[in-house]
Amino acid sequence: MARPGGRGHGDVYLDKPRWVCHNSNVALITITKLANDIPNEDAAYRFLEHLRWPDKPVCPHCGSINDHYFLAPKSAVGRKTRTGAISQRRVWKCREKGCRKQFSVMTGTIFHGSKVPLRIWLFVVFEMAANKNGLAAREVERKYGVSPKTAWFMTHRIREAMKVRAPGMLVGAIVADETWIGGDPTKDNHYKPEPAPERVTPANRPNLNTAKTPVLSLINTTTGEVRSKVVSDVSGNTLRKVIGEQVNMGASTLTTDEGAQYLHLGKEFLTHQTVNHSHREYARHGVTSNQAENYFSQLKRSLDGTHHHVSKEHLDRYLAEFDFRYSTREITDTERVYRLMGQTAGRRISYKRIAGG
């Protein structure tokens, strides 16, 4: 169906492809279907347009929903760029008087400014959303023929989209536990043990002075959501600050292990129940922290087996990735892809910001 008027009168934006559906009964997305239904860049742009703009395009510059017009290419093959190359990028122009800027479906998203074909982006997004153990950058490099830096940057952009935006407070039955991420420092060839302190304090206890990185995870067993965060240490004051920012403690219950750092914190919850792991107690009359243990088990297996090493500077993004998949574990891969695509807008990040340049 052609869009009348304007310079884009030949556009077929209103024709919804067969693989676009906006209800719970979405057609299953598989690698085979993606390859068949999105054979080129034009189809990839149309697919993303119908995910981001179900009704009509929205200008990412000014937010206008006026009837923007499509800049139809002069050639049926595509538009010619300044270098003479042919591009199938679909470009729109805002009708708002104070704007009048051009934009595409990639503008303002994690795909913004990328020279990687959008079709490849869609394949990588699907794999990261569906792969339980994650997707290594080296694997993206081998499969899709991109450079190592490009593959690394792509995966981190997608992890940025997986983060929870403006998260509200968790309310309900909360399970809290901490773990340590990283290798055993004693196995390093250059390891030199530090002398034991004369007086042991909370600031220099051995478990707080290790080379590993502590991570706190909060699991809402009522909704199934998990939120993980890198913390500086596992002292009571640090955990109190992090949990207080994420949980409505006065309206929730807390379940932990026997760690002493939770004793004073637990008094701020409706109830605080513990299981004594040191006495091999893991469940007692329905009281258990096994949800956190199960999450940590999958997280560590994936980090060790897929990524092998994750630096502390980037660990928060990897945690966001595994939090996203765990929190959406009850839905299908297809629904998870649709949800992830809905979170790509407003998540643009630069390479310098990620690499620390």
Image: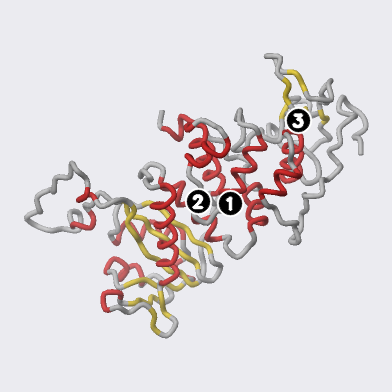
Query: Which residue: 55% across, 43% down?
Result: 158
Query: Which residue: 75% across, 57% down?
Result: 26
Residue 203 falls in image quadrant: bottom left
From the viewer's perspective, tell me whether residue 347 is left or right of residue 207. right
Relative to 66, residue 177 above or below = below
From the viewer's perspective, tell me whether residue 331 is left or right of residue 320. right
Of the two numbered discs 3 and 2 on the same chain, state the one appearing first in sequence: 3
Q: CA distance from mark 2 to mark 1?
A: 8 Å
Near-viewer residue (43 or 277) = 43
Q: CA distance from mark 3 to mark 1?
A: 26 Å
Residue 281 position within the rendered picture, expressed as x and y whole percent measured from the top left: 32, 79
Residue 277 position within the rendered picture, expressed as x and y whole percent measured from the top left: 30, 74
Residue 288 position within the rendered picture, expressed as x and y whole percent measured from the top left: 41, 76
Q: Disc 1 marks which residue? A: 129
- Where disc 3 sits, the SS reads loop
Residue type highlighted by circle 1: Ala
Residue 64 falls in image quadrant: top right
Give the residue furthest to the bottom: 285
Residue 266 falls in image quadrant: bottom left
**In the rendered image, which quarter contains the N terminus?**
top right
- Where disc 2 sits, the SS reads loop
Near-viewer residue (295 or 273) = 295
Q: Answer few, some or many: residues within 10 Å of disc 1's Cα (few below 14, many 20 plus, some between 14 and 19).
A: many
Q: Disc 2 marks which residue? A: 134
Near-viewer residue (182 or 348) = 182
Do callouts 2 and 1 mark residues in contact (Cβ within 8 Å)? Answer: no
Residue type highlighted by circle 2: Gly
Query: Which residue: 68% across, 31% down?
Result: 61
Q: Disc 3 marks which residue? A: 90
